[in-house]
C-alpha cells in the first residue's frame, strides 16, 4: 500500500525567502503525485500534479516540484515566498494503473513573516 | 455547477448518536471519497467509491458506513458516534480512473462528538 511522509510539520519563513517542503512516498510501482494547499478557513486546492514525463512540474502561484524516482521524493519549491503563501501544504500519492485511492501526507504548516 | 457540496457545515453529537453526513456533486464524477482531517495527521481516507454501487475501504474505515446508490450522492454514516470521531470531514470527487484528472474537495463538515 502507498504511504506519504512529510517530515516538516511547521516551517516559518520571512517574505522573499526560498521554500522547499519535503515529501517522500512509499510505493513500488508507477505513482501519481500531487501537492495540495489549504489556505486558512478554506478547503483543499490542487497546486500541481505529476503523472509522467518531465519530472520538474510547474504549478500555480509560482510553485514547482521535482519528482526524483531514485529518492522516492516529490519536494515542493518556490524561489520567493509571499505572506499570502501562509497555508497548510499536503503531499499526496496514488499508485498503479487504477489509481483509485489518493493517500495524503500529514501536512506542513507554512507561516510567512511579513 | 455547484461543484462538491456538503451538509451540514457543523454538527454536535452526543456519544452513541447516529448521523449521516451528506455529500453531492453535480459534475458527473465517477470517483468520490471521504476523508477526515485531524491536526498533525493530515487527511486520512475513510471510504471511497469508483462508481454507483461500488464502494471500498480506505485507511480508517472503522465506525463509518457508506453507500453509493447514485452517481451524484455519497453519504457517510456514523452509526454510533464516539469522541474519537471528532474531526473535520471532507468529501472529494473526480471524473474517473484517468490519471490526468484533478480531485475536487467540498467545503467540509466540522463534527464534534461529546
Image (tube, coloured by chain):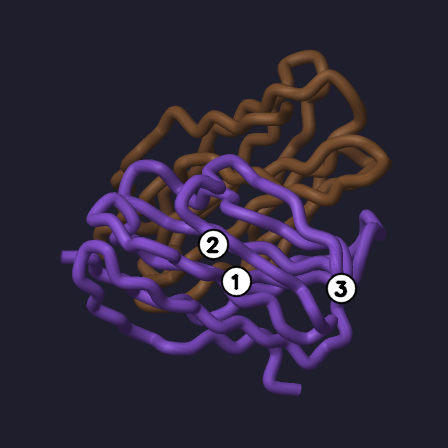
| Mark sitting on residue A71 | none
Q: Mark 1 touching mark 3, by CB under 8 A?
A: no
Query: How many callouts does the rendering have?
Result: 3
> Dot 2, how many residues are within 10 Å of its Cα: few (below 14), some (14-19), or many (20+)?
many
Q: Furthest-bottom residue in view?
A: B1
Chain drawn purple in the picture: B
Q: Chain of mark 3?
A: B
User: Which residue in the structure is indicated by mark 1?
Assistant: B91
* Percent coordinates x, y for residue A107 in the rendering: 40, 40
Chain drawn brown in the picture: A
* Percent coordinates x, y for residue A30 in the rendering: 80, 27
Point 44% across, 29% down: residue: A6
Q: Is residue A95 left or right of residue A109?
A: right
Front residue of A51/B73: it is B73
Q: Chain of mark 1?
A: B
Point 49% across, 42% down: residue: B61
| Mark sitting on residue A37 | 2
* Percent coordinates x, y for residue B21 in the rendering: 43, 68
Amino acid at each position: 500500500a502507498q504511504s506519504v511522509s512529510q517530515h516538516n510539520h511547521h516551517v516559518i519563513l520571512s517574505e522573499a525567502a526560498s521554500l522547499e517542503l519535503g515529501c517522500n512516498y512509499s510505493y513500488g510501482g508507477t505513482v501519481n503525485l500531487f501537492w495540495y494547499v489549504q489556505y486558512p478557513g478554506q478547503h483543499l486546492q490542487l497546486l500541481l500534479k505529476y503523472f509522467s514525463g518531465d519530472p520538474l512540474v510547474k504549478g500555480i502561484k509560482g510553485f514547482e516540484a521535482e519528482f526524483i524516482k531514485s529518492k522516492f521524493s516529490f519536494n515542493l519549491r518556490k524561489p520567493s515566498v509571499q505572506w499570502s503563501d501562509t497555508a497548510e501544504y499536503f503531499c499526496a500519492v496514488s499508485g498503479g494503473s487504477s489509481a483509485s485511492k489518493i493517500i495524503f501526507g500529514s501536512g506542513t504548516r507554512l507561516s510567512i513573516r511579513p | 455547477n455547484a461543484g462538491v457540496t456538503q451538509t451540514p457545515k457543523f454538527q454536535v453529537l452526543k456519544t452513541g448518536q447516529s448521523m449521516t453526513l451528506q455529500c453531492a456533486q453535480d459534475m458527473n464524477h465517477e470517483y468520490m471519497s471521504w476523508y477526515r482531517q485531524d491536526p498533525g495527521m493530515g487527511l486520512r481516507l475513510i471510504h471511497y467509491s469508483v462508481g454507483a454501487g461500488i464502494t471500498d475501504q480506505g485507511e480508517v474505515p472503522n465506525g463509518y458506513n457508506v453507500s453509493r446508490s447514485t452517481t451524484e450522492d455519497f453519504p457517510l454514516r456514523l452509526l454510533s458516534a464516539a469522541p474519537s470521531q471528532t474531526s473535520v470531514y471532507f468529501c472529494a470527487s473526480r471524473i474517473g480512473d484517468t490519471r490526468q484528472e484533478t480531485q475536487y474537495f467540498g467545503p467540509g463538515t466540522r463534527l464534534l462528538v461529546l
